[in-house]
Amino acid sequence: MYLEVIVCILFFLVACFVVKLSKKIFYLTLMITVSLLALFLVTGCGGGDALNLRSKIENIEDNTVTRIGDLPFIKGTKIDISKSIIFGEGMSWSGQLSVYVPKKKIEVFNYYVNNLNDYNWKEQTTIRGETSVLNYLGPNNRVAIITIEQGRFGPSNVTISVSPFTEEFEKALGDSIKEKYLDIEDFVKN
């Protein structure tokens, strides 16, 4: 920031000598330029809370993560609020989260495979590929689909979609799902 100001002033001085302005015009123009730059620096560097959008976004992210009580998150995970939507909270939320995880795709995939059972999610299908997909059945008659893609510079792009079963799905498979896959006793650790 300060380097840009110094470069502007030097450019102005060189231009004045090249054009060969009179001393009065030179000093008048110099004073106006310095005054405008000082005004720009003073107003541009204000640190009031009204202009601090980054802290507001971080507060939204923190609030969003606390609304979700039934999914694990790798430390350092960042939620892209502009691409996410959440209905409800706690153990019965639904919606779609777009998150950036500071780990490679394979590490993220393995993390979810190893940790979702602890949150009462039961694995249905997993696909490893360019875009890896995990499909889980969970508490409160919900399904979670997690897609994982490797980001350009290291972090992984993850989309977590959680929604209730459709009525037809629950009618067709509801009892067998509840008996076979969502029995709470299955999750008790010895």
Image (cartoon, rainbow, N blue to C red):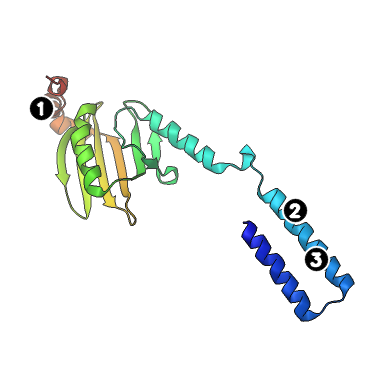
Residue linked to disc 3? 30
Q: Is residue 120 visible?
A: no
Amino acid type of the residue tagged 3 in the rendering:
Leu
Q: Residue at x 19, y 38 (%)?
A: 113
Q: Is residue 148 above or below residue 30?
A: above
User: Which one is nearer the viewer's eye here, 121 or 51?
Assistant: 51
Alpha-carbon span between mark 1 and mark 3: 81 Å
Tell me the quadrant of the picture where the C terminus can be found.
top left
Q: Is residue 2 above or below residue 127?
A: below
Q: Which quarter of the picture shows residue 35?
A: bottom right
What x and y, as percent, mark residue 133? 21, 46
User: Which one is nearer the viewer's eye here, 116 or 37?
Assistant: 37
Mark 1 residue crowding within 10 angstroms, few (<14) / some (14–19) / many (20+) = few
Q: Secondary structure at mark 2?
A: helix
Q: Residue at x 20, y 36 (%)?
A: 136
Tell me the quadrant of the picture where the N terminus can be found.
bottom right
What x and y, as percent, mark residue 93? 34, 30
